[in-house]
Amino acid sequence: MLFALFYFLRDGAAIMRRIRLFLPFEEAVREKMLAEARDLIFASVTTSLAIAAVQGVLCGGAFAIVGVSSALFWGVVMAFLSLLPVVGAWPVWILASIWLFSTGHAARALLLIGVCGGLGTTIDNILRPVLLGGRSSLNGLLVFISVLGGIAVFGALGVVLGPIVVATAVGVLDVYSEKGIGNDAATVAE
């Protein structure tokens, strides 16, 4: 991801010029589609940051409740790990649960697993469609389906790529349907 990010930041303007050349639409339509895609990417990234913060606070709070030392530190670590595709926060809370089990605190370990594993991991599936649904032109159900479909197709990276692909497809379909409606209306008027 960091390798790709370097080239996207370095060559972003050239990539966008190429994309503009290849899109077979009028300039106003093309710029509208690119603006919608940019807005959805921005919304996806800020939503990911917000969800990572919520997961860090939730799991860090669970660490504090069960008595794990340095709960604030571990909450921040889990928030950062939540941003990484595939990795997530589970390595931290799984190891903490194992440590609690091995030290004879089974109830605390189960509470930690319940909060971090049950609530912490499902918060993404609940919050992401809610947060993205209000910030994109897609309705909440379509965002939810695109997140699940993106995960099925792209893996963990599909959380971000799924809504972008669906929004792009909806934008292209909107352009073609508007052209079709405009052509039908022109035909009827003649």
Image (cartoon, grey):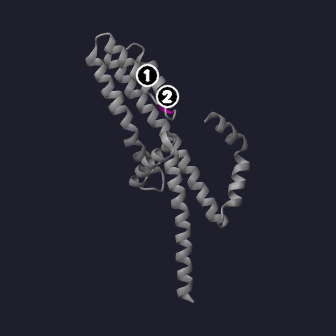
Percent position of residue 15, x then y: 70, 49
Between 63 and 35, the one lying in front of the other is 63
Local packing at callout 2 (Cα closer than 10 Å; few below 14, some 14-19, many 20+) is many
Residue 81, numbered label: 2
- In this view, the residue farthest toward the left is 107
Q: Secondary structure at mark 1?
A: helix
Q: Say whether disc 1 or disc 2 marks the residue closer to the N-terminus.
A: 2
**Quarter location, residue 102:** top left
Q: Is residue 132 above or below residue 89?
A: below
Q: Is residue 165 above or below residue 63?
A: below
Q: Is 63 left or right of 11, judged from the image as shown?
A: left
Quickly name the residue at label 1. 92
Magenta span of residues: 79-83
Percent position of residue 26, x then y: 66, 67
Q: Amino acid at mark 2?
A: Leu
| Distance Cα–Cα, label 1 vs label 2 | 9 Å
**Label pair 1/2, CB-CB below 8 angstroms:** yes
Local packing at callout 1 (Cα closer than 10 Å; few below 14, some 14-19, many 20+) is some
Percent position of residue 80, x then y: 50, 28
Residue at image coords 55%, 47% = 41
Q: Is residue 67 visible?
A: no
Q: Amino acid at mark 1?
A: Val
The C terminus, quarter of image: bottom right
